Amino acid sequence: MPANPQKIQALRSCGALNRHPSFEESDFFDPHDLVQLKYETLRAVEVDGRPIAVAAADFGLSRPTIYQAQENFRQNGVEGLLPRKRGPKKPRKLTPEVSDYMRTELSHDPDLKPGALARSVQERFGIVLHPRTIEKALEKKGRQTP
């Protein structure tokens, strides 16, 4: 059965696309589906008794990935195999305090450019913000940059 382009796009958009499938597709098993691949790997280890090193080689996953999948599966079931957002989960530099300061500065000078505002934030808080980060934050709050 050939790869379904819609399914490939859906898997890609949610981060569940296995970019390096090492199996041929069958009527049931889709090697592009990373969640299914992890589940089948865990099933081979837990049910069939396959050693993790063998399962890693057979399914094309690293041993640390399998150990992490085991732990996630134990804690959260199949949902634990779903991809999670990588990186920071919330802004680290653009804190509410910094945002309030920028709003105050802009209320005093509405024509203040993002570069000047970035320098002002750096002087006040010691935080380096890229002017584009400030532009995006202002656009998100409904203020277009000059």
Image (tube, rainbow, N blue to C red):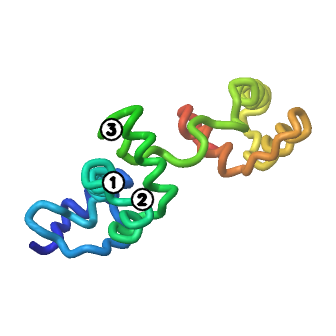
Q: Nearer the viewer, mark 3 or mark 2?
A: 2
Q: Amino acid at mark 2?
A: Ile
- Which mark, by number, is residue 36? none
- Tally the numbered discs: 3
The image quadrant of residue 74 is top left
Which element carries disc 3, helix, strand or loop?
helix
User: What residue did someone put label 2 on?
Assistant: 52
The image quadrant of residue 6 is bottom left
The residue that appears at 34% across and 67% down in the rendered structure is 59
The image quadrant of residue 139 is top right
In the drawing, does residue 131 fall left or right of residue 4? right
The correct choice, above or below, for 116 with respect to 107 in the image is: below
Q: Amino acid at mark 1?
A: Val
The residue that appears at 37% across and 33% down in the rendered structure is 76
The correct choice, above or below, for 88 with respect to 26 in the image is: above
Spatial separation of the CA atoms under disc 1 and disc 3: 19 Å
Q: How dense is the environment of label 3, judged by Cα within 10 Å: few (below 14), some, or many (20 and up)?
A: few
Residue 77 percent location from the top left of the image: 32, 35
Q: How dense is the environment of label 1, judged by Cα within 10 Å: few (below 14), some, or many (20 and up)?
A: some
- Which mark, by number, is residue 79? 3
Whether label 2 touches label 1, CB < 8 Å: yes
The residue that appears at 82% across and 41% down in the rendered structure is 127
70 vs 46, nearest the viewer: 46
Whether label 3 touches label 2, CB < 8 Å: no
Spatial separation of the CA atoms under disc 3 and disc 2: 21 Å
Residue 5 percent location from the top left of the image: 19, 67
The correct choice, above or below, for 60 with respect to 132 in the image is: below
In the drawing, does residue 122 fall left or right of residue 19? right
- Which mark, by number, is residue 45? 1
57 vs 102, nearest the viewer: 57
Q: Nearer the viewer, mark 1 or mark 3?
A: 1
